[in-house]
Image (tube, rainbow, N blue to C red):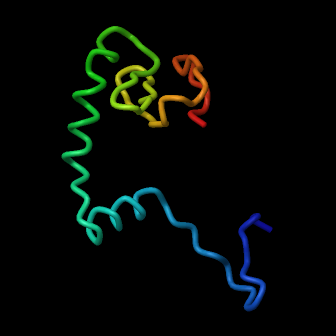
Amino acid sequence: MSGRRHMPETGFIVPIVTDRAVLRFVERFHGIDVETMRLMIQRRCVDGVRYGASAVISDGAKFILRGDTVVSCYPKHWPSRDYREGGADG
């Protein structure tokens, strides 16, 4: 068995919803401008990338960096960790 969950009432497989599907739903049906948000994150993280940081804290958020890529975001009070070594982002 694949480990997929089944609905107990019918036995049918519960669908997997990808991050992309959630993002597009938020963007297209709730009017969130994803590209503007991407630019905001880029501006907040550019110096951290330039100086090789593993995270950038800005406006109450902690943006997790892997090289020149922003891979995640948490509230700034989450425990610190050096994410440059390729560990999971949580």
The residue positioned 44% from the left and 21% from the top of the image is 55
Residue 22 drawn above or below residue 66:
below
Q: Position of residue 47 (x, y in %)?
A: 27, 15
Q: Quadrant of the C terminus?
A: top right
Q: Position of residue 24 (x, y in %)?
A: 33, 63
The residue positioned 21% from the left and 55% from the top of the image is 33
Q: Position of residue 9 (x, y in %)?
A: 75, 90
The residue positioned 56% from the left and 33% from the top of the image is 89
Q: Is residue 1 left or right of residue 24?
A: right
Numbered circles on residues, count: 0
Residue 11 drawn above or below residue 90:
below
Which residue extends farthest bottom?
Answer: 10
Quadrant in the picture for residue 87:
top right
Q: Position of residue 28 (x, y in %)?
A: 26, 68
The residue positioned 34% from the left and 31% from the top of the image is 59
In front: 32, or 19?
Answer: 32
Residue 39 drawn above or below residue 16:
above
